[in-house]
Amino acid sequence: MPATQIESNPSQAQSSSRLQRFLNCYWLRPENAFWMSLRSQALESHPIKGPSIDLSCGDGVFSFLHAGGDFSSEYDVFMEVGNLDEVRDAFADMFDHTNVGYEPMVTLRPDRKFEVGTDLKPNMLLKACRLDFYECLVEHDHNHVMPFENGAFQTVHCNSAYWVQNIDQFMSELRRITRKDGRILLSVKLDSMRDYTLNAHRDKFGQRWLDIIGRGRIESWPSLTNDETWKQRFKAANLDIVSRTPFITATHAHIWDVGLRPIAPLLVRMANALDEHTRQEIKSDWIDLLSELLQPIHNANFNIAPHKQEPAEILYELTPA
């Protein structure tokens, strides 16, 4: 089946509402909020039909928001974090932490659920469980064969394939667990990301500066590659491309490259030390300002580069050949 390129054109009101919901959860990392919101926007024209699986679902918040769920303005993902002293030098994941009494403040539940969600980190699965958005959660490392039957799912979703080392096996596994008439929705970063960082200016900034900014991000993405190689991987796994939707431009990636990542642990510690009223008041003003700043770039085609550049992330819709 020939691949087609899909371009979404949501109304400004829809775009603004989506961005607001992601900012509510990720306000202290606004660069992640707009990236996830654009990813959700790209997925909008691809319905999740059951039985469905969300591979590497993490805490489930992205898929929950994408499905139309919402949280109280008093809730965000930074309320349930740990390892803050180890983030800068040990590259610890602050979100790989949960408390026994953790309860997300859900105000609106999506109309649908995923039948299955998977992740490597037990703490993330515990958080996902609290959402009541997955009928079943499975701890699994996707470098290994998946514990699911052939053709088990109508829709397979994953936005973390570039984290997988054993990528060729993973592609074959995606095909194996997908029904013959099913769909795989795969969002992948491209290695053009390397060109959209400040690493090329190591001689000016120094390695320590780049380590603080980057925290080993790109080095932890072993399957990062270009568009053509992703297509070759799909072909080798006997997968056809139904559609191809670029949604992160070079400009988006340049903005994301620095963002608030270096100071995020300090911002989280400061925000969580505030009394509830003050925290909420500052958060509200913060989101209002960020919404106004980010709305002009909250567009899959936004790019101020003088010439056409490779996208930084693409959504592929695939089907078994």
Image: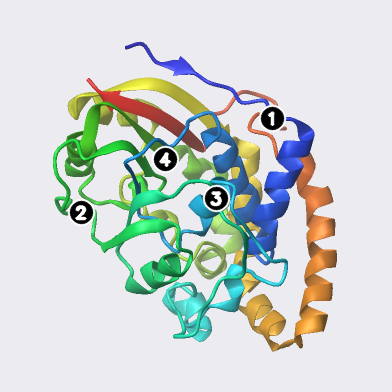
User: Which residue is labeled 4 in the image?
Assistant: 188
Closer mark to the observer between disc 2 and disc 3? 3
The residue lying toward the viewer, choosing from 126 and 313, is 126
**Residue 149 vertical position relative to residue 133 in the rendered view, above or below:** above
Q: CA distance from mark 4 to mark 1?
A: 22 Å
Quarter of the image for the N terminus: give it.
top left
* Residue 77 located left or right of residue 235: right
Q: Are marks 4 and 1 in contact (CB under 8 Å)?
A: no
Q: Residues within 10 Å of mark 4 (few under 14, many from 20)?
A: many
Closer mark to the observer between disc 1 and disc 2? 1
User: Which residue is labeled 3 in the image?
Assistant: 110
Q: CA distance from mark 2 to mark 3?
A: 31 Å
User: Which residue is labeled 1 in the image?
Assistant: 10
Instruction: Tell me if residue 318 can be seen.
Output: yes
N-terminal-most mark, 4 or 2 = 2
Could you tell me residue 38's position as x and y percent?
Answer: 61, 41
Three-letter residue code for mark 1: Pro
Q: Residue furthest top?
A: 2
Q: Report which quarter residue 51 is drawn in.
A: top left
Q: Residues within 10 Å of mark 3 (few under 14, many from 20)?
A: some
